[in-house]
């Protein structure tokens, strides 16, 4: 009898676990992970030093990301809010510490380095801030109190940290998603206008004060500014891939492409796996976003709607930025391709985003 009860408990656990997951999104993410494993393996063999360690690290983050999605998907909305506040406070503190206590890497103070691993805490700010911002906007709509000013203050604090590190791309991404959240709140245009004007002022100031921002924009707009080696190699890789690609590990052009394991992994996939795989990848990202968008429209809960759309927007905008930079539609930006590129902090951040979305979609389906 006890054995039968244990078996029944296991069955109930599995059923409850499956009910917490949106299977379409979950398995789409798993497919992207598998593609990323093969792509990172191929890219890691081109790195002369410790390529085996790089690939093993990626596998570790794949397993961590998988279990993080499964764990977070079981949360209630109340616990989702609590864990978002914890993640936000902790990652904000760590992001400040990168500026104060840790040395620069490639001209930026974004990473904490411990035991051979580097961690970018600002990545965890993204999903946690979106939930907190939605909570504050929801409260402001119902109570018309100081919640909106608190929201603006929190974003301003994040913005100052990101610009100090500096990480202008992350600031731009977060602002874009945040301003869409505010538009969705249908607030008075008198509130939105000064925020947008201040942003443009920050953008112009960053162009003149931050050398790397000015260089990347000028390099994108004017061909005679800077070195276009990375972009040229990326475009050549796509052209060399053709329909079916050159095969795993057989990409010749992408062998000399810097950051082929992270920022430009899409070009490596284009050369080795071909345009058909590129179409599959883009289709998976679009399908995930469309499912998030369509299901979220069924709820009347403003917090759930704004949180879900905000998290979905961060996910798809990061995808669009990475793909667009690799085909020279946007200035180059060190932003990874979700669940495919090597990069532990970003991988875990995207796992948190999907885990949070699973919780919110579950609420919509149960309404």
Image: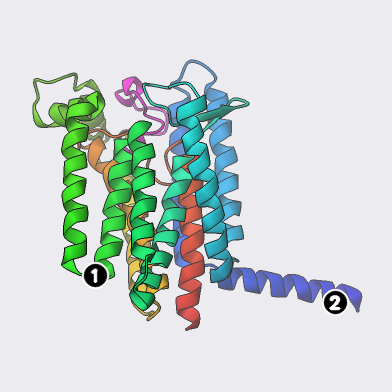
Image location (x, y in percent) of residue 51: 52, 23
Q: N-terminal of the two: label 2 or label 1?
A: 2
Judged from this view, the residue extending furthest toward the right is: 1
Q: Is residue 335 visible?
A: no
Query: What is the crowding at mark 1: few (fewer than 14 residues within 10 Å), some, or many (at least 20)?
Result: few
Whether residue 311 appears in magenta in the rendering, the answer is no
18 w.r.t. 107: above or below: below
Q: Is label 2 or label 1 in front?
A: 1
Q: Tell me, yes or no, if residue 301 can be seen here.
A: yes
Please name the residue shown 21% across and 27% down the image: 209
Q: Residue furthest front?
A: 146
- Closer to the camera in the image, 357 or 187: 187
> Quick check: 25 above or below 9?
above
How packed is label 2: few (under 14 Cα within 10 Å), some, or many (20 or more)?
Answer: few
Identify which residue is drawn at 40% across, 58% down: 130
User: According to the image, label 2 marks what residue?
Assistant: 4
Q: Quick one: SS at disc 1?
A: loop
Q: What secondary structure is the stretch in magenta mostly built from?
A: loop
Task: Count the marks.
Answer: 2
Q: According to the image, label 1 marks what residue?
A: 187
Q: Residue at x 37, y 78 (%)?
A: 142
Residue 245 pos. (x, y %): 31, 37
Query: In the image, residue 150 lies at what x, y percent?
Result: 38, 58
Magenta-drawn segment: 246-269
Whole-number angstrom distance, CA of label 2 to CA of label 1: 57 Å
Query: What secondary structure is found at the residue carrying circle 2?
Result: helix
- Quadrant hosting residue 78: bottom right
Q: Residue furthest bottom?
A: 367
**Magenta-span inclusion, residue 260:** yes
Could you tell whether 274 is left or right of 80 in the image? left
């Amino acid at each position: 009898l006890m054995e039968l009860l244990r078996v029944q408990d296991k069955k109930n656990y599995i059923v409850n676990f499956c009910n917490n997951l949106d299977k379409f999104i979950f398995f789409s993410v798993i497919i992207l992970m598998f593609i990323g494993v093969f792509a990172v393996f191929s890219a890691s063999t081109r790195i002369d030093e410790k390529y085996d360690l790089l690939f093993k690290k990626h596998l570790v983050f794949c397993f961590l990301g998988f279990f993080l999605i499964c764990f977070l998907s079981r949360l209630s909305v109340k616990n989702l809010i609590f864990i978002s506040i914890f993640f936000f406070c902790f990652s904000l503190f760590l992001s400040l510490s990168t500026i104060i206590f840790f040395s620069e890497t490639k001209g930026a103070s974004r990473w904490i380095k411990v035991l051979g691993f580097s961690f970018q805490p600002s990545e965890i700010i993204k999903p946690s801030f979106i939930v907190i911002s939605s909570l504050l906007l929801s409260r402001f709509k119902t109570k018309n109190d100081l919640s909106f000013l608190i929201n603006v203050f929190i974003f301003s604090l994040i913005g100052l940290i990101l610009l100090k590190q500096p990480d202008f791309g992350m600031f731009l991404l977060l602002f874009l998603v945040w301003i869409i959240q505010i538009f969705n709140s249908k607030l008075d245009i008198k509130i939105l206008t000064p925020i947008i004007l201040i942003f443009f002022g920050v953008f112009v100031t960053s162009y003149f004060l931050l050398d790397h921002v000015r260089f990347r924009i000028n390099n994108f707009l004017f061909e005679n500014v800077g070195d276009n080696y990375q972009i040229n190699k990326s475009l050549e890789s796509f052209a060399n891939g053709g329909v079916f690609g050159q095969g795993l590990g057989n990409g010749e052009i992408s062998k000399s492409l810097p950051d082929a394991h992270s920022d430009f992994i899409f070009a490596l996939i284009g050369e080795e796996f071909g345009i058909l795989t590129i179409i599959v990848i883009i289709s998976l990202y679009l399908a995930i976003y469309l499912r998030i968008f369509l299901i979220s429209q069924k709820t009347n809960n403003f917090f759930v709607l704004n949180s879900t759309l905000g998290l979905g927007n961060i996910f798809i905008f990061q995808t669009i930025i990475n793909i667009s930079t690799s085909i020279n539609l946007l200035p180059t930006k060190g932003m990874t391709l979700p669940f495919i590129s090597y990069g532990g902090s970003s991988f875990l951040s995207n796992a948190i985003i999907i885990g949070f979305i699973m919780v919110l979609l579950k609420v919509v389906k149960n309404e």
